[in-house]
Amino acid sequence: MSHTPLHRLTRLIILAALLVSGLHMGTALAQAKVTQTPYKNPKALIDIYLDDPAKLASALNWVRGVMNPLTEAPYSMIPDDIPIIVLMHGTEIVTLARKNEERYRDVVQRMRYYAELGVKFKVCGLSMKDYDYTPADLYDFVEVTPSALTELMHWQNQGYALISATVMDKKFSIEQIR
């Protein structure tokens, strides 16, 4: 089937129009859209179970990731309106022992800061016993629960969103992979 010059010209015009509209769409989509999700009644249960207590500093960034966006504009919630529970039941328990204060001073200061804002720090009683700690060995901002697993079930049944604080070994700096 042979194409007439008019048919070829029509096809070229259509292709050119598609190309121009595609370029226009590409320009419009060149930037990500920022959305402001209408958060209401946020309740977070942050589960921390680490293989190395040195990772707790990074795990506390999960608290920051919940707290900071909600207390800043446009949400501007007050910390009392953001119930956050941090449940610890791994090696990070050693950071809660007063005898280790000097070794873990920075993370303890961060936890105290968040506790003053209303964040509840809870430790698994079973895990605490594994480390031969008693409630008297731990800081005053810590609550001892019977068991991490029963505590996880309880708070999820109360409508708290479970957030598992995953901390990976950092192999690259942001600058290296950006």
Image (cartoon, rainbow, N blue to C red):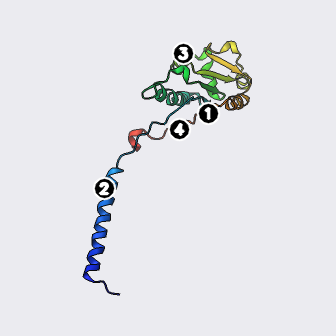
Q: Nearer the viewer, mark 3 or mark 4?
A: 3
Are the residues tagged 3 and 4 within 8 Å (C-beta)?
no
Per the model, the C-alpha gap separating discs 1 and 4 is 25 Å
- Mark 2 crowdedness (10 Å alpha carbons): few <14, some 14-19, many ≥20: few
Are the residues tagged 3 and 2 within 8 Å (C-beta)?
no
Per the model, the C-alpha gap separating discs 2 and 1 is 41 Å
Sooner in the amino-acid sequence: mark 1 or mark 4 = 1
Q: Residue under label 4, please give it.
A: 169
In percent of the image, x 73 and y 25: which residue is there?
Answer: 130
Q: Nearer the viewer, residue 147 or 155?
A: 155
Sooner in the amino-acid sequence: mark 3 or mark 4 = 3
| Residue type at tag 2 | His
Image coords of residue 96 (percent x, y): 61, 19
Q: Residue under label 2, please give it.
A: 24
Q: Nearer the viewer, mark 2 or mark 4?
A: 2
On the image, which quarter does residue 172 sit in? top left
Image coords of residue 14 (percent x, y): 31, 69
Q: Of helix, strand and loop, which one carries label 4?
A: loop
Image coords of residue 8 (percent x, y): 28, 78
Sooner in the amino-acid sequence: mark 1 or mark 3 = 3
Q: Of helix, strand and loop, which one carries label 1?
A: strand
Q: Of helix, strand and loop, which one carries label 3?
A: helix
Q: Residue under label 1, please give it.
A: 161
- Mark 1 crowdedness (10 Å alpha carbons): few <14, some 14-19, many ≥20: some
- Mark 4 crowdedness (10 Å alpha carbons): few <14, some 14-19, many ≥20: few
